[in-house]
Image (spheres, helix red, strand yellow):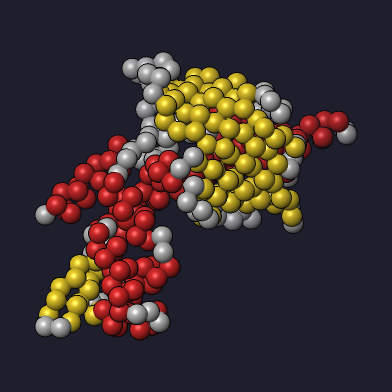
């Protein structure tokens, strides 16, 4: 059985995601590091499609991802580097997200840890941001137009 | 996931909730209006200390205080809390969706591996 996603914020600059998968560490590791698999599960933000996904899975290897929209190619890029790479166990990479216009969005360090027990593998992702503001910004993200419409409605309610 | 949306109002809410005493006050107030000494006593806190925390909550518009005679009555304002929950909720939804796809990618990998091993051992 897979167990639900747990999200915690143990410090002002971190977000920890923990999720269990009904698979082996080897399979999960492969799904997290091979471009053909990453392209499938890394769902893009609304309105964007993943156009580039190049990864060199090794210490010192780079990650290069780019998304495009109807208006811009690239609309957004992610560049990073693996600083730790211990297959099936633990990996750490940096990542910097930038808008197509060159405007930097956010930089963070992401650590993945894998623990296999009882036919399932637990993955723990720790995202470490440069500041609390960046961390809260990431928590604030992921909203689509529907959510934005919701916020506008809420603004109207609050202002009343 | 990556849109950086600055919201000073939410910064205030998250800051206000980043203290156990203030979260305890919010929990108490979720049951109804309370005066300052009712809020202070279960926290084993002095009146001025409780007042300080209530002020932070007021600053985030999580609490409204009204003075009736010598009593300071505090009431919870739910809107900023709802908003804060929506923000974290969207982050969660995004990752839940990703991991749901990852589940099916992993299922396919298992099926492929099985059929490969079957081919090897006729």
Count the numbered circles shown.
Answer: 0
Quarter of the figure that contains the C terminus of chain B: top right
| Residue at figure coordinates x 71%, y 50% from the top left | A115
Place residue B84 in its image quadrant.
bottom left
Task: Give percent across and percent down for residue A5.
Answer: 54, 52
Position of residue A32 in the picture relative to residue A153 (left or right): right
Q: Where residue A122 sits: x, y (%)?
A: 66, 50
* Residue at x 62%, y 41% (from the top left corner): A111
Residue B120 coordinates in the image, percent (x, y)? 86, 31
**Camera-nearest residue between B38 and B121:** B38
A34, above or below B71, in the image:
above
Question: Residue A131 sits in which quadrant?
Answer: top left
Query: On the rendered image, what quadrant is the N terminus of chain B found in?
Result: top left
Image: B95 above or below B20:
above
Q: Position of residue A83 (x, y in %)?
A: 67, 32
Q: Is residue B110 above or below residue A1?
A: above
Q: Nearer the viewer, residue B50 or B61?
A: B50
Observer-nearest residue: A42 or A108?
A: A108
Say whether residue B23 is visible: yes
């Amino acid at each position: 059985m897979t167990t639900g996603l747990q999200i915690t914020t143990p410090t002002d600059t971190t977000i920890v995601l923990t999720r269990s998968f009904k698979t082996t560490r080897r399979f999960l590791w492969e799904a997290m590091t091979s471009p053909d698999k990453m392209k499938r599960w890394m769902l893009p933000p609304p309105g964007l499609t993943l156009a580039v996904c190049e990864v060199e899975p090794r210490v010192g290897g780079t990650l290069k991802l780019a998304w495009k929209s109807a208006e811009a190619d690239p609309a957004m890029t992610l560049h990073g580097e693996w600083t730790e790479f211990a297959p099936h166990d633990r990996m750490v990479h940096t990542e910097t997200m930038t808008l197509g216009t060159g405007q930097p969005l956010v930089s963070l360090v992401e650590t993945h840890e894998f623990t296999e027990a009882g036919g399932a593998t637990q993955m723990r992702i720790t995202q470490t941001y440069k500041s609390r503001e960046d961390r809260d910004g990431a928590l604030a993200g992921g909203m689509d137009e529907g959510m934005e419409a919701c916020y506008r409605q809420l603004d109207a309610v609050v202002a009343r | 996931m990556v849109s950086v949306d600055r919201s000073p109002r939410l910064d205030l809410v998250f800051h206000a909730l980043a203290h156990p005493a203030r979260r305890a006050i919010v929990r108490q107030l979720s049951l109804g209006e309370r005066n300052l000494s009712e809020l202070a006593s279960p926290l084993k806190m002095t009146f001025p200390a409780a007042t300080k925390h209530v002020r932070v909550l007021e600053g985030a518009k999580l609490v409204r205080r009204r003075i009736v005679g010598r009593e300071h009555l505090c009431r919870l304002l739910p809107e900023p809390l709802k908003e804060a929950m929506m923000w974290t909720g969207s982050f969660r939804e995004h990752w839940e969706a990703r991991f749901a796809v990852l589940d099916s990618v992993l299922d396919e990998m298992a099926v492929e591996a099985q059929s490969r091993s079957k081919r090897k051992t006729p």
